Image (cartoon, grey):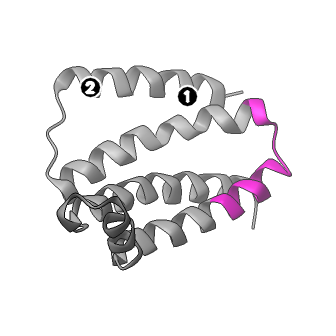
Protein backbone atom coordinates (compact mmCIF):
# COMPACT_ATOMS: atom_id res chain seq x y z
CA UNK A 1 0.00 0.00 0.00
CA UNK A 2 1.35 3.40 -0.92
CA UNK A 3 1.69 6.15 1.65
CA UNK A 4 -0.83 8.25 -0.23
CA UNK A 5 -3.47 5.51 -0.22
CA UNK A 6 -2.85 4.87 3.48
CA UNK A 7 -3.19 8.60 4.19
CA UNK A 8 -6.45 9.12 2.30
CA UNK A 9 -7.99 5.89 3.61
CA UNK A 10 -7.04 6.95 7.14
CA UNK A 11 -8.66 10.34 6.62
CA UNK A 12 -11.84 8.73 5.29
CA UNK A 13 -12.05 6.22 8.16
CA UNK A 14 -11.36 8.96 10.72
CA UNK A 15 -14.23 11.06 9.37
CA UNK A 16 -16.53 8.05 9.24
CA UNK A 17 -15.58 7.14 12.80
CA UNK A 18 -16.71 10.54 14.09
CA UNK A 19 -20.17 10.12 12.58
CA UNK A 20 -20.44 6.55 13.87
CA UNK A 21 -19.56 7.74 17.37
CA UNK A 22 -22.17 10.50 17.23
CA UNK A 23 -24.76 7.99 16.07
CA UNK A 24 -23.73 5.65 18.88
CA UNK A 25 -23.91 8.15 21.72
CA UNK A 26 -27.20 9.44 20.32
CA UNK A 27 -28.69 5.95 20.52
CA UNK A 28 -27.34 4.97 23.93
CA UNK A 29 -29.70 4.54 26.82
CA UNK A 30 -29.90 7.36 29.33
CA UNK A 31 -30.00 4.75 32.13
CA UNK A 32 -32.06 7.08 34.30
CA UNK A 33 -29.23 9.55 34.71
CA UNK A 34 -26.87 6.95 36.19
CA UNK A 35 -23.42 7.60 34.70
CA UNK A 36 -22.27 3.99 35.13
CA UNK A 37 -25.35 2.71 33.32
CA UNK A 38 -24.78 5.15 30.47
CA UNK A 39 -21.20 3.98 30.01
CA UNK A 40 -22.32 0.35 30.09
CA UNK A 41 -24.96 1.05 27.45
CA UNK A 42 -22.21 2.40 25.21
CA UNK A 43 -20.35 -0.89 25.48
CA UNK A 44 -23.42 -2.66 24.10
CA UNK A 45 -23.93 -0.22 21.24
CA UNK A 46 -23.04 -1.50 17.74
CA UNK A 47 -22.37 2.05 16.50
CA UNK A 48 -19.80 2.61 19.22
CA UNK A 49 -18.10 -0.67 18.31
CA UNK A 50 -18.08 0.37 14.64
CA UNK A 51 -16.49 3.66 15.71
CA UNK A 52 -13.80 1.79 17.61
CA UNK A 53 -12.95 -0.47 14.69
CA UNK A 54 -12.89 2.45 12.26
CA UNK A 55 -10.72 4.47 14.61
CA UNK A 56 -8.22 1.64 15.13
CA UNK A 57 -7.96 1.05 11.37
CA UNK A 58 -7.60 4.79 10.71
CA UNK A 59 -4.85 5.04 13.32
CA UNK A 60 -2.94 2.06 11.88
CA UNK A 61 -3.09 3.56 8.39
CA UNK A 62 -2.11 6.98 9.76
CA UNK A 63 1.00 5.43 11.32
CA UNK A 64 1.87 3.81 8.02
CA UNK A 65 1.40 7.10 6.14
CA UNK A 66 3.47 9.06 8.67
CA UNK A 67 6.32 6.60 8.39
CA UNK A 68 6.68 7.64 4.74
CA UNK A 69 5.39 11.24 4.51
CA UNK A 70 6.30 14.57 6.05
CA UNK A 71 4.00 15.47 8.94
CA UNK A 72 3.85 19.04 7.63
CA UNK A 73 2.25 17.61 4.49
CA UNK A 74 0.06 14.87 5.99
CA UNK A 75 -1.43 16.59 9.03
CA UNK A 76 -3.14 19.51 7.26
CA UNK A 77 -4.81 17.03 4.91
CA UNK A 78 -6.79 15.72 7.88
CA UNK A 79 -8.99 18.79 7.56
CA UNK A 80 -10.47 17.36 4.37
CA UNK A 81 -12.44 15.08 6.67
CA UNK A 82 -14.50 18.18 7.57
CA UNK A 83 -16.28 17.84 4.23
CA UNK A 84 -16.84 14.12 4.71
CA UNK A 85 -18.15 14.56 8.25
CA UNK A 86 -20.50 17.34 7.14
CA UNK A 87 -21.86 15.23 4.28
CA UNK A 88 -22.26 12.11 6.40
CA UNK A 89 -23.82 14.01 9.29
CA UNK A 90 -26.39 15.42 6.87
CA UNK A 91 -27.09 12.07 5.20
CA UNK A 92 -26.92 9.72 8.19
CA UNK A 93 -27.88 11.95 11.11
CA UNK A 94 -30.16 14.45 9.41
CA UNK A 95 -28.18 17.43 10.69
CA UNK A 96 -28.70 20.83 9.14
CA UNK A 97 -25.57 22.51 7.80
CA UNK A 98 -25.86 26.23 7.19
CA UNK A 99 -24.31 27.93 4.19
CA UNK A 100 -21.91 29.73 6.57
CA UNK A 101 -20.63 26.40 7.87
CA UNK A 102 -20.21 25.10 4.29
CA UNK A 103 -18.34 28.27 3.35
CA UNK A 104 -15.99 27.86 6.31
CA UNK A 105 -15.37 24.21 5.44
CA UNK A 106 -14.48 25.11 1.86
CA UNK A 107 -12.15 27.93 2.92
CA UNK A 108 -10.26 25.40 5.03
CA UNK A 109 -10.21 22.95 2.12
CA UNK A 110 -8.80 25.62 -0.17
CA UNK A 111 -5.82 25.87 2.16
CA UNK A 112 -5.47 22.10 2.05
CA UNK A 113 -5.37 22.19 -1.74
CA UNK A 114 -2.50 24.67 -1.55
CA UNK A 115 -0.63 22.32 0.78
CA UNK A 116 -1.38 19.20 -1.25
CA UNK A 117 -0.08 20.85 -4.40
CA UNK A 118 3.32 21.02 -2.70
- Image quadrant for the N terminus? bottom right
Residue occupying image coordinates x 70% and y 52% = 4
Label 2 crowd (10 A; few <14 / some 14-19 / many >=20): few
Residue occupying image coordinates x 55% and y 28% = 113
Q: State if disc 1 and disc 2 touch (CB < 8 Å).
A: no
Is 87 a magenta residue?
no
Rendered location of residue 50, percent (x, y):
43, 73
User: Which residue is under mark 2?
Assistant: 101
Rendered location of residue 16, percent (x, y):
42, 58
Is 66 a magenta residue?
yes
Describe the element under mark 2 as helix, strand or loop: helix
Mark linked to residue 50: none
Residue occupying image coordinates x 77% and y 36% = 71
Describe the element under mark 1 as helix, strand or loop: helix
Label 1 crowd (10 A; few <14 / some 14-19 / many >=20): few
Q: Is residue 102 left or right of residue 32?
A: right
Residue occupying image coordinates x 25% and y 67% = 28
Q: Is residue 10 left or right of residue 13?
A: right
Q: Nearer the viewer, mark 2 or mark 1?
A: 2
Rendered location of residue 20, percent (x, y):
36, 62
Q: Which residues are magenta?
A: 59-72
Vertical side of 48 occupied by 85: above or below: above
Instruction: Tell me how far mark 2 sits from mark 1, CA to CA.
Output: 19 Å
Count the marks. Answer: 2
User: Which residue is under mark 1?
Assistant: 113
Query: Magenta residues: mostly which secondary structure?
Result: helix
First-in-chain label (2 vs 1): 2
- Image quadrant for the C terminus? top right
Q: Nearer the viewer, residue 9 or 20?
A: 20
Q: Nearer the viewer, residue 8 or 19?
A: 19
Residue 43: which quarter of the image?
A: bottom left
Q: Nearer the viewer, residue 45 or 56?
A: 45
Amino acid sequence: MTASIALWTSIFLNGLAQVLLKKGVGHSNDAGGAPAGWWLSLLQNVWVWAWGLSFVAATALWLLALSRLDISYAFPLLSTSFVLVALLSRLLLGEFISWKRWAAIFVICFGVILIAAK
